[in-house]
Image (cartoon, rainbow, N blue to C red):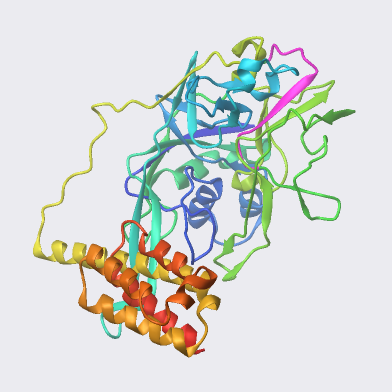
Amino acid sequence: MKTIQLQCTLLSDVIISETSATTGNRHSLDFIPGNNFLGIAASKLYDKENEKTHLLFHSGKVRFGDAHPSLSGIRGIRIPAVVFTPKLKNGADERYFHHLLPADLPKEIREKQLKQCRDGFYVFDGEQATEVNVGKTFALKSAYDSENRCSQDHQLFGYEALNKGLTLYFEVELDDDATQYAEELTAALCGTRHLGRSRTAQYGLVEIKQASFQQLKSDAAVANEEVLVYADGRLIFLDEHGLPTFQPTLRQLGFEGEGEILWEKSQVRTFSYAPWNFKRQAFDSQRCGIEKGSVLVVKANNTPKPASYIGHYKQEGFGRVVYNPEILSQNKADHEGKAKFKFEEQKKTQSEEPRKEVKETPLLAYLKRAQEKDKRVFDVQKVVNKFVNKHADKFKGERFASQWGSIRSLAMVTSDATKLKESVITFLDHGVAKKQWDENGRRECLEEVMNTPNISLQELLINLASEMAKECKD
């Protein structure tokens, strides 16, 4: 087997969405999945399906690993799910290993109310655990109407992206059958490449080159019957019926012979998404699996090799596990399960270049105002839609249609938020409709939405009253 170690540096912001959905609140992953590098290699080497392309991209004998945020020549890892931290401020800098906690927890540990650490990539070096700073940027975009040469109506959406400058490390593993193509594969990957979403716009530019780095080590000296299986990659398993399962068998986890999974000591997180197949212009089947960072504790008489790939979709980076990782061994914690590592955040260095300020021009000023306006409209409409969906049934009838019309009239002539709120409250407290507003929680829900922070009250009431008047008449 041959392993190629590579470094990926973001030359621009990169969008790696958690799901393939095109609507809703979309977030970016904090790592780059291996299927992105498989796609880069395939774009260079996949001219037609033959024995070579089948070996490289379909057989599972070439595995494109996930790229993790890293520091100082050490590949970061997702914080293991067995790492717990106190909820309360007292002892907030402490970490405990769930699988090493005593069966009868001391009172002082119980009072700290331990909670699971779930987010972030850490670099473990000696007794130091440093969280890698993975910066993200959110940008609001609008679809373009080429006929009218303006933004399309109702086509506003947002992108969350990884900030440029981030360094990530990943590996490509080749079985003996495929080592003859190692140089060709390296040449296809290395250089300036594009990946992720909107790569034809301002996103997705990266530089890939060969670089050596340190990986998560396995503790070969462990003699305990309990074997830890750390999910360095996301794991997907199928049962005997071909359906996804979150309860793999020992054989699927790489063990031979008898044994059992100690679920009470294990910490498993899950994920689910449907990948988009660009060639077929359709979604593939739903993928459900065990999330990166999960830890399974297995009681067995044998231990597989230190690191391996298990499960399905190995060629895309799924399935990489490390058995008995050194950082989770018993000698890294005291008798009460308290970790000896010192956990801290990444320190900013002088070498980190700040984002350059762009000189203000009339065009940039106009675009900035347009973007702020679009975001303001988006925020208002989001609150209005939520209110209508939740409370529309409380206001059915022509009488309330006229009431909402009066509120809209007040909002049209008053821009000051304080005066407008006083005018609406005065309107609700007087007249024959006061009793109807006080019933069924109508007044409370209106006052609650008027107190929405960081939003223009005038625009909110104008849009809300218009929508509610339509709902009352339907």
In this view, 35 is above or below 86: below
Q: Foreground: 442 or 134? A: 442
Residue 192 in picture, x, y percent from top left: 36, 47
Residue 71 sits inside the magenta stretch: no
Q: Foreground: 349 or 65? A: 349
Residue 228 sits inside the magenta stretch: yes
| Quadrant hosting residue 443 | bottom left
Q: Going by the image, does 158 lie left or right of 245?
A: left
Residue 102 in picture, x, y percent from top left: 72, 16
Residue 261 seen from this side: yes
Q: Main secondary structure of the magenta part?
A: loop
Q: How many marks?
A: 0
Furthest toward the right, the residue is 258
| Quadrant hosting residue 3 | top right
In the rendered view of the protein, which quadrant contains the N terminus? top right
Q: Foreground: 57 or 144? A: 144
The magenta segment: 220-234
Q: Going by the image, does 455 lie left or right of 273?
A: left
